[in-house]
Image (tube, rainbow, N blue to C red):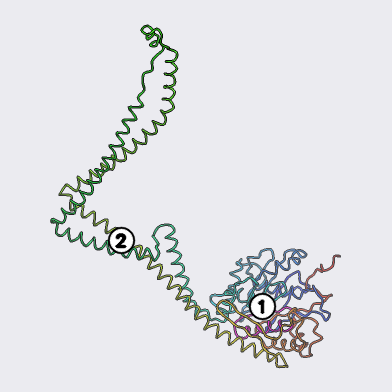
Amino acid sequence: MLVEIRSNIFNEGVIKFHEGLNVVLGDDVGSNSIGKSTLLMILDFVFGGKTYLEHNADTIKELEHHTYEITFKFGKNYFYYMRDTNDKNHVSKCNKDFQQIDILSLDSYTSELKSFYELPCQDASFRSIVSLYSRVWGKENLIVDRPLHSYSSEKNYKTILNLIKLFNKYDELTELEKKHAALKKSRETLKHAGKLEYITLIGKRQFNSNENKLAEVRNEIEQYKQELEQMTISLSELVTEEIVALNAEKDRLVNEKGKYESKLKRIEFNSESKTRISKKKFEKLEEFFPNVNTEKLNNIESFHGGLTRILSNEIKVAKSNITINIEQLQRQITQINNQLGSLLNVENQPNYLIEKLIRLDTMEKQLVTENKFFNEKERLADDTKNVASQISEEKIKVLEEIEFKLNKKINDLNNSIHIENRRAPSIKLTPSNYTYNIDENTGTGKAYTNLILFDLAIFKLTPLPVVIHDSLLFKQIEVSTVDNIVNLYSEFSKQVFISIDETSKYSDNTQEILKKSCIQELSNSKLLFTKDWRNKN
């Protein structure tokens, strides 16, 4: 249990705690900003929370960063720690004189607390157990009809899972959850391998097509195997059939190549450069034909030369394309010639059959592999769905048990705090959501009463080590109901921390319990801290 907290910012220097109910008392005028809620927030900080650093930033601003020296007692042993507001992620482990002997991460610190409090919830962290039931002004867990939410945007299924863990029922789901996680990981791995093209993932239609193709391939393989065994006329017929097909293809290619070669010759012939007639030759022509117009002949020759230059680029492109086509066709013809040579060589005929069989065998393996991965994909999908269904069924079974116990305990507690026969709130749990309400009564006082009832039912039924309730929860609850709630608090041996003020309106018995359980009494003249920054002055 928590024994004490020390800090030089406390007016009293040290605040001591005891088993059962621990009360922070306010004054009878309900003075604000005297430190009641802040002390409870410091307790949440001591138990591993971080909200104090954010919500109470004014305290750090006014008092600067400060340290809390924390003492716990478990059995006969004491344990000492220091937590500084300047380092939200670490806690110092100390000796009894608060000299640092080790530095723990915040997770390691809360793990130690979980171990010391002997919490059996293997898969739940200490904070996920304790934080929700520390209901202090400034935290987000004060929504009266959502008592399982640590903050408003928390996923419903996570709050349900935390409840199952707190009731120590998660072990019954652990193996199924692990199996489900493994199946999901396998599905993701398979999908990722498909995206990276390490394997080929196909759909149902392709699977059916592959099955048909497999039958054909296996039939061909069987035929070739039989022919290899026989090595008789059937082989020659098979080879002859392929030779005929190859020859036909070769003839087609040779004809096409011939067409391109003829076209190339025509282009080359038409594009041969003609010798231009020089001006001197035209002058010699005048000797025989004195009346010839040499100037006009020169102009015509210039025109033809220009036209030839314009067309020369297009002719070059056409020749290049035709040459490429001829080369491609020649390569195909050469390839066919090689195949024909191989087929016509009788010694190579068995090799030909073997190559065929190898190709068919490769195709068979590819089709088998594709269909194998399709079947694996389908199996993983079915198994994942089935395990998810099992988890859902098991959760429903567990939640029905928790729901029954909770509602029974809430009803019992409700009857103990109300003199009149008031209807108790009830919770309805499903694997993905929950409701907590009471029909016919939507008043604020009743709503906070229901929230307290829920926490105390959890406190009684589970190993939850502490409960922290701020004074705002009691403000609008009927006086007689608060009397009975305080009575309930006092019955616990586990530590309960509350703040409350205006106590004179409660019964003598309640005032006596509160006074006896008081760990810190605060008022306008007796503040929690050494500095008062409420007023501008």
Q: Does 67 sit above or below residue 444?
A: above
Q: Measuring 80% from the left and 68% from the top, which residue is drawn there?
A: 531
Q: Is label 1 in contact with label 2 (beta carbons under 8 Å)?
A: no
Q: Which mark is residue 229?
A: none
Q: Which mark is residue 2?
A: 1
> Dividing the picture into quarters, in which one does residue 460 lie?
bottom right
Give the amino acid type for the residue marked by disc 2 in the picture: Lys
Q: Measuring 42% from the left and 30% from the top, which residue is drawn there?
A: 313
The residue range painted magenta reads 445-470
Disc 1, SS: strand
Mark 1 is surrounded, within 10 Å at the Cα level, by few (under 14), some (14 to 19) or many (20 or more) other residues, namely: many
Residue to which mark 2 is pinned: 365
User: In front: 346, or 72?
Assistant: 346
Disc 2, SS: helix
User: In front: 360, or 151?
Assistant: 360
Indicate yes or no whether the magenta region holds residue 454. yes
- Comparing marks 1 and 2, which lies closer to the viewer? 2
Q: Give residue 245's position: percent from left, percent from top.
A: 23, 49
Q: Is residue 403 left or right of residue 44?
A: left
Q: Give residue 216's position: percent from left, percent from top.
A: 27, 62
